[in-house]
Image (cartoon, rainbow, N blue to C red):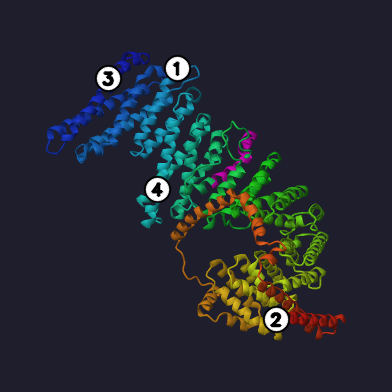
Amino acid sequence: MFLPHIALSELEDECFSKILPKAVTMFDSMMKEILEQVGGLSSQNTELCALLRNILQAMMQLIDALSTCVRHISTFEEAPDLDAIRSLPTCILKVLRETFQHCKESEVVYCGRLSLVADLLQGLFKEAYSLQKGLLELLDRISLDSSASEEEVCDVVTVIHNLLDICSIISNLDIALHANTWKFLIKQSLKYQSLVEEHLHHGDISNSLCDNLLTSFHSCIELGEQIKHAGLQEATQSPEYKLFQKTAKMCRFFANTLVHYIKEFKFFLTKYCSCFHQLYLQIISKFPPSLCAPTLPSALYEELKAAALVPMDALLLQLLPLRPFAEIVLQQDLQLTREHELPQCLLLVSALGQLSSQPEEVLQLWYTGSQFSEETPRLPLYQALFTSFRRCFTERQVPVLLPGVMMKGQAQVQVSLHNHICVQLCASVAALTPVYFPVLERCLVNTVLQADTQTALLATDVWCFTARYGTAELCLHHVLLVAQLVKACTTECYQSVHLGLLLKRMVFLMTPNHQMALVERFPPSEVENLPVWRHVLLRALSHDARQRVETDIIGLTQKTLTNWQNGAYQLGQLDKVNTVLSSLLVVVRVQSSPEEQCVLTAIRIITQLWLRMSPDQVQTHPILQSTLQLLLLISAFLVKNLEPQVICDALLCVDAVVSQKCPEELLLAALGFLSSLGRIFVPPDSQNHVLPRLSSLFAVLLADRFWLLHQHALEAFSQFAEITNHEEVISLSLSVEETKTKVVNYLSKTVNAQEDVESRLQRLKLETAVTEQHNERLENDKEKTSNKPAAEAADSEPCSKRPRQESGAEEEYSRYIQTAESALKALHALTESKASSSAPPPQWLEARLQELQTLITHISTARHTT
């Protein structure tokens, strides 16, 4: 009744500034009175109950009076200036904040006696709700231009911050009120962006948005789990499902609002990039394939994806240009919890996919890493991605699955983490600007040379794509680089293995001319180049290049063996023999015709070496174990062309090493050789020597308790049994019932004990720490590791005169007589095989045998005389 008689221009000075602060004071005093008196409230204390109800009614009347003020001002056709009603928004927001706070804490305040005043509290909340709605509509009509005074700007900022305080109070009271308050807050921030952006508490606003998003998101997760456990996922009309949808809608609202706010104020939010990074990781960690993601019905997950997961890509897009965000994400020693390792990896993959649409300065920020010492250290994106993939050990072992690339005419399939990242990396390389190729190449080299094999394989896949996608000259450049690195690895170490695999694959991608260039650059006729060719598959080479490599390796092998023979077979020279044998293995791996010269030469070479092998010496000198391992590997490929006596000698050596403690790699080579014997038919006159020993060896190896050796023994025996003609070996090998049961279970693919999912995950998590420690130890001891094999070889290879100085006379007699015996047995087998053919032995053989007989007589006579 009083307001209409005051002009709009005089309202603030004559009325609002004088009355409204007193109204707020009165409201505060009534609130204080309630808090002081409420302790004695009870249904019996009617006087106090009436007092408190009267106070609440008076508070409602005061709020109604404020609503009347708002409605009165809203009746004017033109919106008033903010100066004309300055006290009104401030005082109303104070009253609203106290009212909503009181309603929120009512259960605690009234402590079980809420029913006595519940109707009035409900009415109080509705009045406050209506008052806020009217105030926001009034403020929405007001506009400020660039000429606004500092006081007006300060008033707008105060309104925004007060609304932020109210948002934190009403978050659990009413979903619609909460959402509408946030909408108006953001709308006002953007409406007056140029005026208020330097005055807003951006950290409080963005942090509050993040907190509300996470709260809504976690509420959705909890509701989803309740719906699943109650079996209500099909009941779309159930109260739980409807509440889930409302909560998901709020989740989507806060996510989209946060993205929009960051888009408009990103340069004021650089200090809060760590918060955004953690938000991203927390959201992603609750979705498959994360191992800590809850199991929800697919329909609920789809709704939750639309609400929270999809906006994360938009969030990342806004954060990419921010240097502090890049520095946090790409820091070298980023400390993450185990459940955030995979989300971090997926974040990097997503960033990689979004960079193609970014300007040059953003590409440089992410691709190059830190360039100067004064910069905050950060890795190049490719290196960070490989490092992150390495840390996802458990996820690689499970393995977790992600959506693959959609192909025309084919349904989308789930692929491994390795496959997913590899495809994204290759797509990025295909679009990469040439200026960043040196960075990419350095990252690939560093990753191939690190200890984790699967990460090195990922880098190998990407490197091969790079070589194939680029020009032939680029491929040649990369192959020469890798070959030089292989050559630099003078010993067998993990770097050599990784580089060798890369070289093996890249040679397939070379043109014939470039393959010949590789041969010219690293000629196989030189011993120092053999480590390069040990990793090359000859079938990858053109005819001319392959012929050149085979000829050079065979020639070098023959030359080395001749030198060894001329040097009286000194053990100190065996390292050179082993080097050429490892290259000879490359030649015989190719399925060549038995009539080819290189095969015939290889057979002569290994036959000669088998005749020199002595089981006693193999056990005594470790260097001979390496020789034996190579001979077994080569013989497995040439087994169809070997003489029965050579096979007998090989089995004798295998029998000797199996009975003694020897390296696992030697036993694995022995299993390969034993398996290959299934491809041949043993002549009747040799069966008594070969078959019993073969079955006894299989029986011993199948009974081995070391799981890796046992598994390979099962594989080797099954391959032998599948193709052999000597079925009696099978039954003799399985004479022990336990061994027979294991073989039968293996062939029938029987699983004795299956690990449950939870136990397996726990085991893999424990293995992660062990594996990482092992890899770190390998890398920390890189120099020591690379020199260790050479040191072992030096320790295990005596000088040429040392055996005679330290060996006893009996050992020397034994060694020489075994050598002579082996040579005579081989000669005997050769004469018998030639006797059945038309080719007679050479004429000089009889005379040489007589000379040997005379020599044996002299040795015997000298022994008796002594």
Instruction: Please report whichever mark, 1 or 3, sits nearer to the chain's N-terminal start.
Output: 3
Give the overall secondary structure of the magenta segment: helix
Q: Is residue 681 left or right of residue 255?
A: right
Would residue 343 be counted in the magenta stretch? no
Q: Secondary structure at mark 4?
A: helix
Residue at 56% over, 40% down: 330
Q: Secondary structure at mark 2?
A: loop
Type of residue at label 4? Phe
Q: Position of residue 93 (x, y in %)?
A: 34, 26
Magenta-highlighted residues: 345-366
Marks counted in the figure total: 4
Q: Amino acid at mark 3?
A: Lys
Closer to the camera, 800 or 421?
A: 800
Query: Which amino acid is tagged 1?
Result: Glu
Viewer-proximal residue among 105 and 392: 392
For discs 2 and 3, the disc positioned in front in the rendered view: 2
N-terminal of the pair, mark 2 or mark 4, is: 4
Dividing the image into 4 quarters, which one contains the C terminus? bottom right
Q: Which residue is disc 1 drawn over?
A: 150
Distance between mark 2 and mark 1 Cα atoms:
102 Å
**Mark 2 vs 1, N-terminal side:** 1
Quadrant in the picture for the N terminus: top left
Per the image, the residue denoted by label 2 is 681
Q: Earlier in the sequence, mark 4 or mark 1?
A: 1
Q: Which residue is mark 3?
A: 22
Q: Position of residue 248 (x, y in %)?
A: 43, 45
Disc 4 from disc 1: Cα separation: 45 Å
What kind of element bears circle 3?
Answer: helix
Q: Is residue 30 visible?
A: yes
**Nearest to viewer (mark 2 / mark 1):** 2
Reading the image, the residue beneath label 4 is 244
Which residue is depicted at the point 49% across and 16% down? 147
